[in-house]
Amino acid sequence: MCGICGEIKFRGKPSSAETVAAMTSAMAARGPDASGLFLQGSSALGHRRLKIIDLSERAQQPMIDNDLGLAIVYNGAIYNYKDLRKELEGKGYRFFSTGDTEVILKAYHAWGEDCVKRFNGMFAFAVRERDSGRVFMARDRLGIKPLYYTKLHDGLRFASSLPALLADKGVDTEIDAAALHHYMTFHSVVPPPRTILRGVRKLPPAHTLRIDPDGEISLNAYWRLDFRADPEEARYGFGDWKERLNAELEAAIRRRLTADVPVGALLSGGLDSSLLVGMLCRAGQSDLNTFSIGFESVGGEEGDEFQYSDIVADHFGTTHHKIEVDADRVLPAMRDCVRAMSEPMVSHDCIGFYLLSREVSKHVKVVQSGQGADEVFAGYHWYPPLMESRNPVDDYAEVFFDGAQTDFIRAVNPRFVTGDHSRRFVEEHFALPGADAAIDKALRLDSTVMLVDDPVKRVDNMTMAWGLEARVPFLDHELVSLAARIPAEMKVRSGGKHILKEAARDVIPEAVIDRPKGYFPVPALKYLQGPYLDFVRDIVKSPRALDRELFNRDYVDTVLADPESHITPLKGSRLWQMALLEHWLQVHKI
């Protein structure tokens, strides 16, 4: 797990070592163990390293293979790299390191751009061809690893984080009107390739980007999630699917033990993280470190789920760490938490993961996380109503959007009202082939878009802020593909995740399976009171916010007067949503 960046100039113009050094420095937290810079003519590559696989200097990046004429910067983990290495050795390739970075380099030389189809893991990388000057970039299928870029008049820059791109001039930082619509309507999710800034784009998951020396850019998809079962699976019963699920999940968890350092686990006490811990222990993990976090209760809403995480930790005998956070610790950490965000993320989970990661990083460098199971196995409350939907777009918007178009118009400055972008996006996504039923359309959208640009990004940003690598077995692409083909009714029953719950009964205590669904609660950011309300008021009423004029002043005043009356359908604070965006812009000096 690392941070990568680079600058590519077109038509032979020289790249800037100073610019790439500045971007590399901006990502120091992502890779606290080492840094590197490579400059050759029109390309410069930068890297921050977190040592997880092959801890030696042989695996240092940027990695150069002079015999092949290739250079690479890479962020992630390829879990099947040992098998690929054996295959490449059979083709005559010889290796100077023992990690996965060199395997990607050789795989690109052997199989070209199709090499990405052979990788099981999370990754974002850029390979430069010395002789042609061409650069090839790729991002993993579920977008676990980020990759941002900005086009210049004479080139392109890329980085693992959006703020790193702002380390040098030339980036258009005007607000993207369509992205603002997504942020305020599509539950703060800004789908790729857009970001909140007009001049910055992100490479979509499961895509590659080829940049030729003359400036021609080619974007290609190499994988799509398909919900159609094959003929043999059409005959499966519930038991068959459950058996397949168990096998795939166990394989996904075992793959993510691939490391040359100890691997821990985040344990919230929910079904997903509890099942993950149970399977890790069943796989033979001894002395497993597990971690939970809790916050003060506000307004009668509990701020921790320790009673459930304790059950699992006691049952499996893990070395369990409980991090208790009182309200006085949240606000002082908020600015640094927001600074760690590549994009504005409104979820209360962010500060939770940020503070949790700070403590976890004192014990381990790698953790497995249960993120993604709700989207992949239909765990949210909005999925059952879609089982019989005749108007999928309307019904999805009804349960997931933070408001209607009229709400957006009330909230923002008129210059940003350029169309109902979120609804149009859902319409276009639902029309794609590969998912026929309304429920499958929603699951595909959530698994490949919402999940990527909300929970997954949240985990990456907050863990990497402390040099901690998070691995997400529920987003193993083979497991996700299998889950998509499982009939929807087997997933949505029993309040959601039915088949996963049944698979879990053979592994973990019943008390954490049939409990009410929880989440990572930070009540003080939902029910804004006292110093939290003062904090938010200072942001939205600051001279910079008033000068920027993102939001209608009358609307801001109305929400400030009674914030608890302006809670979104998915239980978020409208005031916090506006304040977080403005705070992110201010923290990053935009």
Image: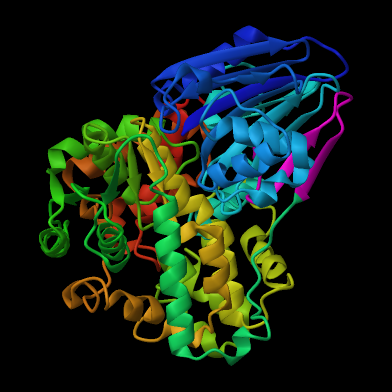
Q: How many marks?
A: 0
Q: Is residue 427 left or right of residue 47?
A: right
Q: Residue at x 32, y 50 (%)?
A: 349
Asked where in the image residue 469 lies, by quadrant, the reply is top left
Residue in front for this viewpoint, 67 or 566: 67
Residue in front for this viewpoint, 424 or 17: 17
Which x, y percent locates residue 590?
A: 52, 26
Tell me if residue 126 comes above or below residue 395 in the rendering: above
Q: Residue at x 55, y 40 (%)?
A: 146
Residue in front for this viewpoint, 441 or 128: 128
Which x, y percent locates residue 97?
A: 54, 25
User: Residue 579 lies in magenta, yes or no?
Assistant: no
Tell me if residue 122 comes above or below residue 398 in the rendering: above
Q: Is residue 385 left or right of residue 73?
A: left
**Residue 169 seen by the camera:** yes
Q: Residue at x 46, y 24 (%)?
A: 49
Tell me if residue 252 comes above or below residue 532 in the rendering: below
**Residue 397 seen by the camera:** no
Q: Is residue 561 left or right of residue 41?
A: left
User: Residue 217 lies in magenta, yes or no?
Assistant: yes
Q: Is residue 459 left or right of residue 513?
A: right
Residue in front for this viewpoint, 151 or 216: 216
Which range is magenta?
201-220
- Colour setting: rainbow
Q: Residue at x 56, y 42 (%)?
A: 81
Which x, y percent locates residue 21?
A: 56, 12
Tell me if residue 255 comes above or below residue 506 in the rendering: above
Which x, y percent locates residue 387?
A: 53, 87
